Image (cartoon, rainbow, N blue to C red):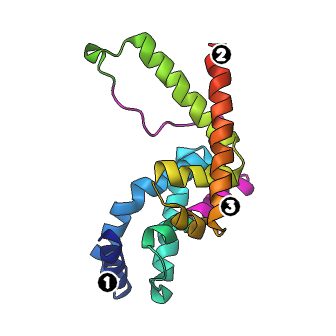
Amino acid sequence: MQDTEDWALAFRARDGDTDAFARLVRRYQRPVVHFCARMTGSLEDAEEVAQEVFLGLHRSLPTLEPRARLSTLLFGIARNLSLNCIRNGKRRGRDRMVSLDAAPVDYAGGVTPDRHAEASELGGLLEAALLRLPEDQREVLLLREYEHMDYGAIAETVGCPVGTVRSRLARARESLRRELEAWDHGS
């Protein structure tokens, strides 16, 4: 079980094992950066916030208790620091959203340049639509769809009841559906 291993690494890190902490960082750095980038709209801000997340984890090692999954704790820290970044107006990347899912295109494999352009446009529209969602809806959608957290873990991460998570998620999905339908009818 990964959670048991995560906590074992955290306790070893607390005891001074720098390699154990480095393994935790390697394991969670990419998902934390992706989450923060989608929250803040800026890869540059996300990388900075992710550094703060792991610094916060390191500082909290002496008092850390395994009350929840370590990933839930990390994404909770990432959520709070991302929201602080947004609220403090520190966002550098407001006018540009970086797609973290871009992959090389193999036109010989049947993807035409026109189809690739349409997919890129749709991806950009989706990223922009995510940024227009209210923060409380965006965070639950990202945690569910991109980080594959269950409702209980999301509720614990954002500090609200499971029913609230479900309703925020439903509203977020409905908003995205409306935006994508409007795009589809306009193209």
Q: On the image, which quarter does residue 110 sit in?
A: top left
State left or right for residue 94 relative to residue 49.
Answer: right
Specify the segment rendered in magenta: 78-104
Q: Is residue 60 magenta?
A: no
* Residue 9 at least partly seen: yes
Q: On the image, which quarter does residue 11 sit in?
A: bottom left
Where residue 53 appears, x then y in whole percent?
Answer: 52, 66
Q: Is residue 86 magenta?
A: yes
In front: label 3 or label 1: 3
Dot 2: element: helix
Residue drawn 64% across the image and 36% down it: 176
Mark 1 neighbour class, 10 Å CA radius: few under 14, some 14 to 19, many 20 or more: some
Q: Which residue is mark 1?
A: 12
Dot 1: element: helix
Q: On the image, which quarter does residue 127 sit in?
A: top right
Mark 3 neighbour class, 10 Å CA radius: few under 14, some 14 to 19, many 20 or more: some
Q: Of the residues shown, which amino acid type is indicated by label 2?
A: His
Where residue 12 appears, x then y in whole percent?
Answer: 31, 83
Q: Which residue is mark 3?
A: 164
Marks 3 and 1, the one that precedes in the sequence:
1
Residue nearest the observer in this picture, 13 or 6: 6
